[in-house]
């Protein structure tokens, strides 16, 4: 099952620039880091995860890797039992891409 709490490492062009957490639960995805939160939905088909999340700033003291306060992110990648290797692209901004490595942390209660 993909439903769990996941830790995240993310960045652009192979450079880790941030870390956070996310929860995947029954088609819903939500999480964040020290400056931004996100909520959205996901699907799994043939070991491929596809998600769309809305990201927004909750702290005035942080900057994200895109320099945008609020945006939609389209995510896709391979779903394995202990790791997710994902790419996210800011909707409407080709080239604004983030690499995401998610590692399974905890089962949901």
Image (tube, rainbow, N blue to C red):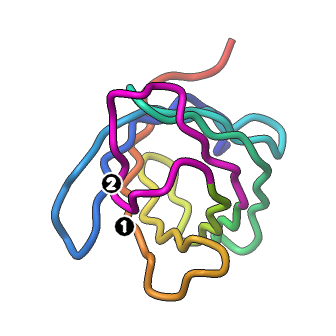
User: As displayed, is residue 85 above or below residue 21?
Assistant: below
Q: Position of residue 22 (x, y in %)?
A: 54, 35
Q: In which quadrant will I find the C terminus? A: top right
Q: SS for tag 1?
A: strand
Decide if residue 100 is on the left or right side of residue 71: left
Residue 85 lies in quadrant: bottom left
- Tell me if mark 2 has few (under 14), some (14-19) or many (20+) residues whose alpha carbon lies within 10 angstroms of its own: many
Tell me whether the residue at label 2 lies in contact with that at label 1, contact meaning CB atoms closer than 8 angstroms: yes
Q: Position of residue 29 (x, y in %)?
A: 70, 41
Return the residue nearer the eye: 74 or 77. 74
Return the residue nearer the eye: 20 or 23. 20
Decide if residue 33 is on the left or right side of residue 54: left
- Marks 2 and 1, the one that precedes in the sequence: 2
Q: SS for tag 2?
A: strand
Q: Which residue is mark 2?
A: 10
Q: Which residue is mark 1?
A: 99
Q: Is residue 67 magenta?
A: yes
Furthest toward the front, the residue is 60
Query: What is the distance, in whole Å, between disc 2 and disc 1 at their CAs?
Result: 5 Å
- Tell me if mark 1 has few (under 14), some (14-19) or many (20+) residues whose alpha carbon lies within 10 angstroms of its own: many
What range is drawn magenta here?
52-70
Q: Is residue 95 magenta?
A: no
């Amino acid at each position: 099952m993909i439903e769990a709490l996941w830790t995240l490492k993310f960045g652009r062009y192979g450079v880790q620039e941030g870390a956070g957490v996310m929860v995947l639960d029954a088609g819903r995805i939500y999480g964040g880091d020290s400056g931004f939160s996100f909520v959205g939905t996901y699907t799994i088909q043939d070991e491929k995860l596809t998600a769309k999340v809305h990201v927004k700033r909750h702290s005035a003291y942080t900057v994200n890797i895109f320099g945008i306060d609020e945006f939609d992110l389209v995510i896709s990648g391979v779903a394995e039992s202990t790791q997710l290797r994902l790419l996210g692209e800011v909707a409407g901004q080709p080239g604004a891409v983030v690499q995401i490595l998610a590692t399974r942390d905890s089962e949901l209660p």
